[in-house]
Amino acid sequence: MHLRIISGRLGGRLLHLKDGGWACFRPTAQRVREAVSESIKARIAGARVADLCAGSGAFGFEMLSRGAQSVDFVEKDRARAQALQTNARLLGVDTCCTVHCIDIRRFLLSPRHQRYNIVFYDPPYDDEALAQNVPDIVKLCAGDGVVIFEHAKGRGAPEVLRALEGCAVSSRIYGDTEIAYISHAV
């Protein structure tokens, strides 16, 4: 299985994914990655990015390709985390990537992370309970940062998004995928 980086200095390069253990893998569709990247393009240059539940890391690598300063990948699956490290090395961006092989809750509770300009959160669609992490994920953002929360259209997330205090939320739908953009209200 291969995924292609869409644009930027790494545009056209492939992310190599090992065949074993990826059966339930659902990477963000290329057209959704392109639309999201275009919608936040003014924020990317020099950004500190977190790619949570990273999977292939396609979003984080796309951000690096388009000018982000650094990416922290958070992926609890050991094989996927190793693939992220391998792809970072093959793409020549390993010096600006950190791979955290850790559960999302443990990452959120750890004191070592920084504030991010862009946080991409794409938990498995079949685990609606993971939407409950969104309020804590918003706390990872710098004052002008944005959380991009990808989820199944109309499932589980709307209640969590409505309950966010002090945040501005907008959504866009792409087929069965809904993207919520969350930022601190000004």
Image: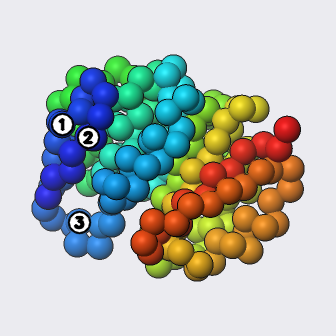
For the point 78% across and 43% down, the residue is: 184
Mark closer to the observer (3, 2): 2
Residue ID for mark 1: 12
Q: Secondary structure at mark 3?
A: loop
Q: Is residue 68 above or below residue 109?
A: above
> In the rendered image, which quarter contains the N terminus?
bottom left
Q: Position of residue 151 (x, y in %)?
A: 52, 67
Res 27 visible = yes
Q: Position of residue 156 (x, y in %)?
A: 63, 77
Q: CA distance from mark 2 to mark 1?
A: 5 Å
Q: Position of residue 59 (x, y in %)?
A: 39, 45
Residue ID for mark 2: 5
Q: Earlier in the sequence, mark 3 or mark 2?
A: 2
Q: CA distance from mark 1 to mark 3?
A: 22 Å
Q: Is residue 121 above or below residue 62?
A: below
Q: Earlier in the sequence, mark 2 or mark 1?
A: 2
Q: Position of residue 103 (x, y in %)?
A: 51, 56
Horizontal relation, residue 119 to residue 10: left or right: right
Q: Earlier in the sequence, mark 1 or mark 3?
A: 1
Q: Amino acid at mark 3?
A: Trp
Crowd class of label 1 (few under 14; some 14 to 19; many from 20; radius 10 Å):
few
- Whether the residues at callouts 2 and 1 have beta carbons within 8 Å, the answer is yes
